[in-house]
Image: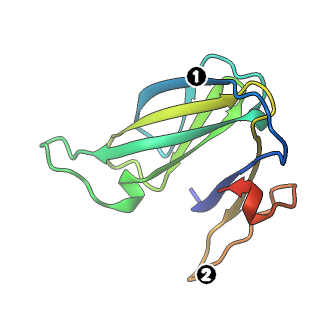
Amino acid sequence: MVPAVILAILLFPGYPVRAAYRVRQGTTTLTSTSQAQSISAVNSISRAFVVIHYYYGSDGTGNVEYNADVGMASAYLEDTTTIRFNRGSSSDDVTVSWTVIEALDEEFEVFRGSQARSGTATLYTPSIGATVTGDTCFA
């Protein structure tokens, strides 16, 4: 798997809106470098995002695995019923706790982008299909 920068930007409107959210939570044990988790459907992936709460790995003897390729995972909504998890290595299983937050009205809009990582670059600028400013967004 090619390491990638995966980005979700939340864009908040500049006017007051009613706050209505739906939250889904769960845990998933990752056994491969790319794995899907089914969830109850969100209305639109442009109004929902996923957050990984914690991760840990084990080598089967109770020793925690600290290798970032094994232990760190990324997650995004692949479609309205699927979370896609990715990580650099599958040498050990990793359990992640996740939350999907969905805006039911216009509380925020989600833009996504990704870009392959390579070499020693430290700055990436993935295209997200929108122009945002720092005072109305969260990345």
Report how far apart the C-alphas of labels 2 and 1 lie in the structure.
34 Å
Q: Secondary structure at mark 1?
A: strand
Give the residue pinned by disc 2: 121
Give the residue pinned by disc 1: 38
Residue, far front: 16
Q: Is residue 98 left or right of residue 45?
A: left
Q: Position of residue 121 (x, y in %)?
A: 61, 81
Quadrant of image for the N terminus: bottom right
The image quarter containing residue 43 is top right
Taking the spot 68% from the left edge, 18% from the top edge, the residue there is: 41
Q: Amino acid at mark 2?
A: Ala
Q: Position of residue 46 (x, y in %)?
A: 79, 37
Compare marks 2 and 1 and give the one earlier in the sequence. 1
Residue, far right: 130
Q: Is residue 38 left or right of residue 87?
A: right
User: In this view of the protein, which residue sits in the foreground, 79 or 88?
Assistant: 79
Q: Position of residue 25 (x, y in %)?
A: 48, 25
Residue 121, placed above or below residue 5: below
Q: Is residue 61 left or right of residue 43?
A: left
Taking the spot 61% from the left edge, 75% from the top edge, the residue there is: 118
Q: Is residue 51 left or right of residue 26?
A: right
Q: Amino acid at mark 1?
A: Ser
Q: Are marks 2 and 1 in contact (CB under 8 Å)?
A: no
Taking the spot 62% from the left edge, 16% from the top edge, the residue there is: 40
Q: Secondary structure at mark 2?
A: loop
Quadrant of image for the C terminus: bottom right
User: In this view of the protein, which residue sits in the foreground, 66 or 102?
Assistant: 102
Taking the spot 59% from the left edge, 21% from the top edge, the residue there is: 39
Q: Tell me the crowding category of disc 1: few under 14, some 14 to 19, or many 20 or more residues within 10 angstroms, Cα based.
A: few
